[in-house]
Amino acid sequence: MKKRLVVMLSTILLIGSGLAVDNAAARKKALQVKGSDTIVHMATEWAEIFMQENKDADIAVTGGGSGTGIAALLNGTADIATASRRIKDKEMGLAKKKGLDIKEHTVARDGIAVIINPKNPVSELSREQLKKIYVGAYTNWKKVGGPDKKIVLTGRNTASGTYAFFNQKVCEKEDYSQKMMNLVSNSAIVQVITQDKWAIGYVGLGYLAKNKNKIKGLKVEGVAPSQETVVDDSYVINRPLFFYTVGKPQGRTKQYLDLILSETGQQVVTQAGFVAIK
Amino acid sequence: MIFPGPVKDKLIKYCFLGAASTSILIVLLIFGFLGKEAVPFLREPGLGKLLDSRWVPVSFVQERFGLLPLVTGSLVVTMLATLIAIPFGVCGAIYIAEIAGSWEREIFKPFIELLAGIPSVVIGFFGLIVLGPIVKEVFGLSSGLTALTGALLLALMSIPTIITISEDAIKSVPRSYKEASLAMGATRMQTIIKVIVPAALSGIIAAVMLGMGRVIGETMAVLMCTGNAPMVTLSPVEPVYTMTAVIASEMGEVAFGSEHYRALFWVGLVLLFATFIINYIAQKVLHTYQQR
């Protein structure tokens, strides 16, 4: 028993240390992209395309959150910080103190469509009404001008970046109603909305386009969700997704950014369910 | 062979011993691992947080890690599923063991085995697309994703377990009991209900308990079909969030070492403890009936 344990443990340790060494080696020369978990999948996809086109290039993409990314950029441990929010004044001040010239690049936008069943006559909600529905103050459609039916509230699970984004932007940081169903994917929400006439949910804009005949996107503050209204910022439930660099991007960083803003790069954005900016 | 006989014998013995004790080792390792990840929660933010009445692990106001909604969620689904599965499982087992002819048995058995082998994600999919809307229509609900939908699916999954083990128990009732009863002039049904089932009761209860064990730990089907709303309710027609669903849904993206992460390990510990209790009761019941 003892021997077996020793063998087992040493194998684990060996593999573990091997991985650690490998990571350290990779970190030295690779372009470090760090930050938002919302962006991490897209950034990885871009990196893969980039490395296919440039065989000698090496890009390491990691998540951890927007704040982590920006902190790493200021510390010099990342070359690019990705963020799903604008850099804070405090962080900007810190950069100034260090003599760093931070440049902002919008790489994509994130728009969230509020969706209902096409048979539901409601077609428009104000931001205030939407908030009241999601924090649980309104539980009946008649409160917002619909029929006398109970609202079936659906949303994402906490693993989704959209959960926090919607919580912040629509509920203004108040907790969601405990009656909100925590569904595990955008498609699960679409599925529920399709089946339940009086359900409401939210999905990435990409999903609305894909399921146009099954679900209805609500107008918010009088503006319908679409690529155009998200890009011009008239549809309120949206946010830009940023890349931050120190100084004007050069070399590999510039090439990587160019790829992202190219047609191929923006296709990745659409495929990931976000909104392309071009 | 380079080893002399006795040494070889010993070697083989240890090999078998090692294989047998692997499961003990793994259980202990899992307990240790769960405990290790869960314990820091006691210091920061403290055990009291788990007694909260709400589960709001991501919040801009205040993160709350009350296990109550999750425990009631699992409780409702498990109890309901067991209640639904018992009549089907036990009656099915009685029929197959006592009444069915051998050709009937040959039809039933493969189908029951097939039912046992259906992956839970497929059952979940079936629940989401087919059963959910049916439940919604039949009970006139606003949504089909409820505790009841999940319970029906779980009952479906535990029925094969209950049938197979109950059938064994019924079949192991000595032939002489049955013959004596029939000889006394009892009808076949009287014999089954008054003699055979009571004699096999310990096995049947064990079967139900094992079915329950499968139900409480089942994840995929409940994750897909119970709606996952973390509210405290014992109503079968409301959406519920079970302990297994919480772990599956939230573990994937939780920040390593955060309070949320530790809280999820507490959910795991509670779940493990619940299964432990169920097993313990099953053993106790079995023991009592065997002594009688």
Image (tube, rainbow, N blue to C red):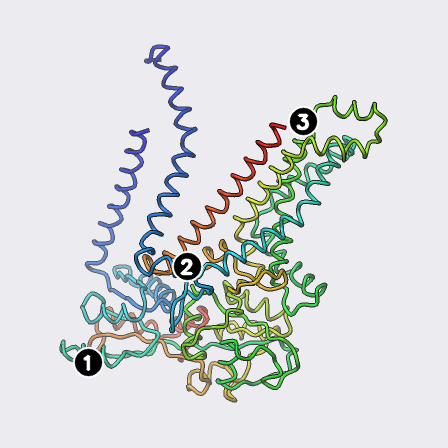
Badge 3, how many Cα within 10 Å: few under 14, some, many 20+?
Answer: some
Identify the element where label 1 is drawn.
helix
Q: Is residue B115 above or below residue B185?
A: below
- List x then y, in percent, for residue B134: 69, 61
Tag 3 or tag 2, which sits nearer the N-term?
2
Which residue is depicted at the point 48% across and 68% down? Answer: A156
Q: For the residues marked 3 and 1, what is the alpha-carbon distance in whole angstroms? A: 80 Å
When asked about the image quadrant of residue B55, the answer is bottom left
The mark found on residue A93 in the picture is 1
Instruction: Name the residue type under label 3.
Output: Ser
Q: Residues within 10 Å of mark 1 (few under 14, many from 20)?
A: few
Residue B226 in the figure: left or right of residue B246: right
Q: Residues within 10 Å of mark 2 (few under 14, many from 20)?
A: many
Which residue in the structure is indicated by mark 2?
B50
Residue B137 sits in which quadrant?
Answer: bottom right
Q: Position of residue A6 (x, y in %)?
A: 28, 33
Q: Are marks 2 and 3 in contact (CB under 8 Å)?
A: no
> Tag 3, which secondary structure?
loop
Q: Are marks 2 and 1 in contact (CB under 8 Å)?
A: no
Provide the residue designation for mark 3. B172
Amino acid type assigned to the residue bearing label 1 in the image: Gly
Q: Residue at x 58, y 63 (%)?
A: B239
Outermost residue on the bottom side: it is A222
Q: What is the distance, in whole Å, between disc 2 and disc 3 at their CAs?
A: 46 Å
Q: Give the left or right position of residue B218, taking residue A49 as reference.
A: right
